[in-house]
Image: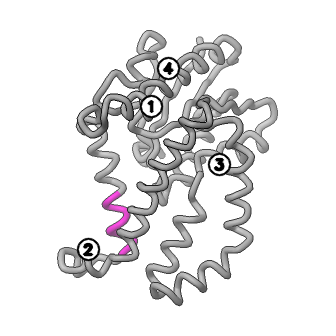
């Protein structure tokens, strides 16, 4: 019997790379599926390599603009960006015979719209950090910025089950961002399971797996998958 794991991530999770590596080493999958377009895969890896290559210069620039604490955190966020892609790639390279498959496909128009939505969310998160003194200092006098961001990520993981996503978007946008892509991922996962030897791990945004709608987990419920939020990996030793 093939084991199916569905792992819900937060794309800004500072501990995401460590948590994902820990989980993969724990269950040792022979098939990995990721929420990523195949056309986007190589460019995502290249972007990560460039961030690492320019790490020192970018860190110094951010420190000059925002101070030491913010500058270091902003660079850390840049370096973990796309960890779902480069961490699974590292695992595939290290473990012989593992296959890694992109399970998110869409046309160029849809891609541009979703990338626009992601860009807005990403910039809003960075602005939150850059404006830390204004947004947080009065309520968190004894907390460093890293702790505040960690708490924000934890709250995001905790709340994702109860957020009525369908009420936050128009019907068209809801289908575009979630249900249409879930349908594609479901087909890919079902097809890949037919040729998986023992363990399949799918990694995608937590909203797709825990969101308050007929999400990807519910679509695949007949396969009895194990569903986890990535931060829940911390419970395992």
Mark 3, mark 2: which one is toward the viewer? 2
Marked residue nearer the N-terminal end (2 or 1): 2
In whole angstroms, how far apart are the C-alphas of marks 3 and 2?
32 Å
**Which residue was labeled with disc 4?**
183
User: What's the residue at 60%, 64% (across, down)?
Assistant: 79
User: What's the residue at 49%, 29% (across, down)?
Assistant: 6
Residue 76 in which image quadrant: bottom right
Of 20 and 115, which appears nearest the observer?
115
**Which residue was labeled with disc 1?**
176
Mark 4, mark 3: which one is toward the viewer? 4
Of 1 and 82, which appears nearest the observer?
82
| Secondary-structure class at tag 2 | helix
Mark 3, mark 1: which one is toward the viewer? 1
Q: Position of residue 17 (x, y in %)?
A: 57, 53
Marked residue nearer the N-terminal end (2 or 4): 2
**Label 2 environment density (alpha carbons within 10 Å; few <14, some 14–19, many ≥20):** few
**Which residue was labeled with disc 3?**
87
Mark number displayed over residue 135: 2
| Secondary-structure class at tag 4 | helix
Residue ranking furthest to the front: 109
Asked if the residue under mark 1 is in contact with the one under mark 2, i.e. CB atoms within 8 Å, the reply is: no
Magenta region's main secondary structure? helix
**Picture quarter with the N terminus:** top right
User: What's the residue at 41%, 15% (across, down)?
Assistant: 221
Stretch of the chain drawn in magenta: 145-152
Q: Position of residue 127 (x, y in %)?
A: 39, 69
Mark 1, mark 4: which one is toward the viewer? 1
In whole angstroms, how far apart are the C-alphas of marks 3 and 1?
27 Å
Residue 206 in which image quadrant: top left
Q: Position of residue 39 (x, y in %)?
A: 71, 38
Mark number displayed over residue 38: none
């Amino acid at each position: 019997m093939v084991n199916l794991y569905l792992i819900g991530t937060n794309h800004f999770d500072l501990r995401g790379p460590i948590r994902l590596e820990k989980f993969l080493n724990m269950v040792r999958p022979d098939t990995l599926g990721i929420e990523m377009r195949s056309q986007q895969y190589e460019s995502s890896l290249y972007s990560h390599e460039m961030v690492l290559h320019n790490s020192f210069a970018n860190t110094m620039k951010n420190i000059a603009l925002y101070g030491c604490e913010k500058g270091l955190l902003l660079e850390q966020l840049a370096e973990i960006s796309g960890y779902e892609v480069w961490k699974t790639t590292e695992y595939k390279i290290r473990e012989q015979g593992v296959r890694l498959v992109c399970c998110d496909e869409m046309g160029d128009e849809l891609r541009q719209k979703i990338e626009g939505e992601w860009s807005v969310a990403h910039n809003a998160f960075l602005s939150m950090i850059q404006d830390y003194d204004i947004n947080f200092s009065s309520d968190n006098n004894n907390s460093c910025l890293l702790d505040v961001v960690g708490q924000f990520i934890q709250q995001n993981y905790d709340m994702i089950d109860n957020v009525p996503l369908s009420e936050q978007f128009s019907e068209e946008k809801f289908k575009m961002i979630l249900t249409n892509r879930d349908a594609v991922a479901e087909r890919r996962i079902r097809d890949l399971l037919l040729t998986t030897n023992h363990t399949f791990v799918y990694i995608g945004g937590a909203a797709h797996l825990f969101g308050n709608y007929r999400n990807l987990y519910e679509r695949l419920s007949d396969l009895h998958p194990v569903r986890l939020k990535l931060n829940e990996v911390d419970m395992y030793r």
